[in-house]
Amino acid sequence: MKFAVEVASKLSGRVGCLVQTETGQKFPTPLLLQTTKGGSIPYLSREVFKYLTEDSQILEICLSTTDHMEEALKAFKSGIASFVGFPEYLSFVTLKDPCEESPSGFHVKDAVPFFTRRGKKELTADRFMDIIEVFKPNIYHSLCDNDTDINSSKKRVIKSVDRTENFFKACLERHKISETLRNSLFFAPIVGGYNKHARSQSIEFVSKHPEVGGFMIDGLHSNGEHATKIPRESLKDIVSHCVQKLNTDKPKMMLGAYTPLAVLELIRLGVDIFDTSYIYLTSTNSQGLVFDYNLAAEKRSNHLALDLNDESYAEDFTPILEGCSCLACQKHTKAYINHLIKTKELLGPILLMIHNMHHYLMFFESIRNCIAGDKLPELIQLVEGCVSEETVAKEDKKIPPILEQVEPASVAT
């Protein structure tokens, strides 16, 4: 696979394209990887997902939910994307599920703790590459120690960098001699927590190797909802430091459930590839995305998402989002989805996943158009307005009416 930058702007990030050289398939960036669980897009059948988009996709295959498929894949011999029923899609294989918080600790010298549906395992670099050769992904990254976040100690951060360098060397040696992986794009993980010196060391080490096809900025959170709670300024500061030191000709990836506003800020800094774990989390939390992404629209939303579990929607017979063309909004109402959620019907999260996926795919299309038109700052301002309005509304809702007129000094005492 090859990556090419098509449009670059100092203020608006960049638009590029991942191209599979064997077939000529093109994947425009900024790009969304389709997060899967057990090889399937959560809540959506193949037919329903095809109804959502006819565009080719790249599946994010998490080994923590698919490692049990290894023996069957050895016999199948055609790669993970074909095995899970999407032969026309490409695949990206990663270790951890970005939708679920990863346990911390359990480190041993030459292996990474690996938490699967069948319990904890220890994964060495050689064992990891054995699995990768069986899965035959189009894109993958080397094994790494990414067990760091904003609260990690300096000692833990330094150890993660040293261990990741050792894993990288072992994986790269296998990659260079593997006939199975010779056409696969090999991503190098950049670790080091929120320590700029450690990040620089990690970048300097992997940048020496021309075989590296892209970079994955990792070790910023422990996955799951943890990624949505990272202080935005801290995230921007460390990612900006990394991007400035990385090769501009190669794609940069960040996995995790980053919020729409965080995604926009990261794209402005130069990050190219994300995943759909945020969509999964909003859908399972009974939320429907309604934030604005169309600069030309006359009617504006003052919310990022609606909590459709709220009683206020029990008799609201309007769609999740007026004007949305997705199947959920065309055929169903907030009241019906509220009823499905209350009765714990599986159709509830299915309809939310349909809407949220459609909304996010359109959001990324708008991002690419805004970058091409040098209007990404305006889009960031638009989404920031939705977030600000929603934050104020939530804070107001938390204040008990009896305290609204109490003097600040009285409350403090």
Image: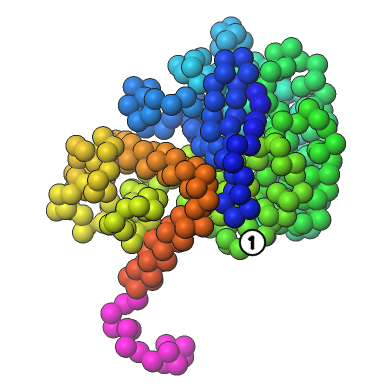
Left/right placement of residue 219 relative to residue 26 reads right
Position of 93 compared to 33: left or right?
right
Residue 401 painted magenta: yes
Find residue 177 and report its horizontal and vertical position in percent: 80, 16
Is residue 64 part of the magenta span, yes or no? Answer: no
Q: Nearer the viewer, residue 65 or 9?
A: 9
Element type where label 1 sits in the image:
helix
Look at the picture and state if 67 lies above or below 293: above
Q: Position of residue 227 (x, y in %)?
A: 55, 51
Q: State the count of labels.
A: 1
Range of residues picked out in magenta: 398-413
At a point 45% along the width and 16% down the height, the residue shown is 85
Residue 338 visible within the image: no
**What scheme was used to colour the molecule?**
rainbow
Q: Is residue 391 left or right of residue 138?
A: left
Could you tell me residue 52's position as x and y percent? 35, 30
Residue at image coords 38%, 70%: 392
Residue 158 in view in this figure: yes
- Crowding near the residue tagged with mark 1, few <14, some 14–19, many ≥20 C-alpha atoms within 10 Å: few
Q: Residue furthest front?
A: 373
Q: Quadrant of residue 284?
A: top left
Which residue lies under the disc numbered 1?
234
User: Which residue is rendered at x = 43% and y = 26% of the image?
Assistant: 55
